[in-house]
Image (cartoon, grey):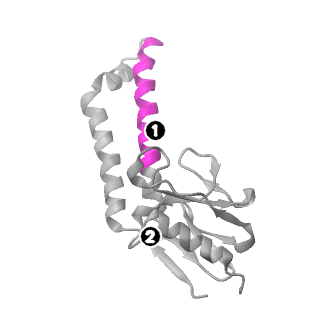
Amino acid sequence: MNEEYFKFKEGVVLLNLVFVIMFGWLTLTLLPSAIEDLRNFQGVEDLYISGFIVVLVWLIVSEFGYGLLLYLPSGTALELHDSHIRVCTIFGLKEIPRKAVKGCKNPVHRMTRGGKAGLVVISVSPQYRVIGPYGFKINPRFHGASVVGEDEQSIVKKIRQWRKNKNC
């Protein structure tokens, strides 16, 4: 089998970066009372709005920032080799042996919306799971539409075909 390489689109990383910066700017512009409450801390009631803003910023940065961090180490989403697969993580490409890859979850088309829309989720053994956007160990995942010349269905088909190829 020939090796296959899948790269991220450069526009996707810029879009994620713009979302993170824009949301931070909107937070500082539209909700200055949260910043003032922290500066003029009087009691517990001053922490409510500030805590809400911190949690909201953390969630947005986690979602958009995770996509940004997946791109930054190498720009490569996935590599299929004869004996192993390399998947993007926030710490660079992680090598996973063929026997540890259990398969791919059925992709939800990105036009259907929802939290899992457009995701390519590769099921792996527990010891090969990666750190996800919220800090927990999860199966490796990335958005299929962010890969050059591919979509989520075509990538999942190629991974399944790679798993079925027993000549290696």
Instruction: Find residue 80 and report its horizontal and vertical position in percent.
Output: 58, 77
Instruction: Tell me which corner region of the image, top left, top right, bottom left or bottom right, holds residue 87.
Output: bottom right
Q: Residues within 10 Å of mark 2 (few under 14, many from 20)?
A: many
- Which amino acid type is marked by label 1? Trp
Q: CB atoms at circles 1 and 2 under 8 Å apart?
A: no
Q: Residue at x 41, y 37 (%)?
A: 57
**Secondary structure category for the residue under label 2:** loop
Above or below, comparing residue 157 to residue 127 in the picture: below
Magenta stretch holds residue 5: no
Residue 152, position in %: x, y? 47, 63
Going from the N terminus, do you reach mark 1 or mark 2 first? Answer: 1
**Residue on which the image places disc 2:** 75
Majority secondary structure of magenta residues: helix
Alpha-carbon neighbours of circle 1 within 10 Å: few (<14), some, or many (≥20)? few
Where is residue 120 drawn, in percent x and y?
53, 60
Q: CA distance from mark 1 to mark 2?
A: 24 Å
Q: Which mark is residue 25?
A: none
Q: Amino acid at mark 2?
A: Gly
Q: Which residue is mark 1?
A: 58
Residue 17, percent across and down? 34, 54
* Residue stretch in magenta: 44-64
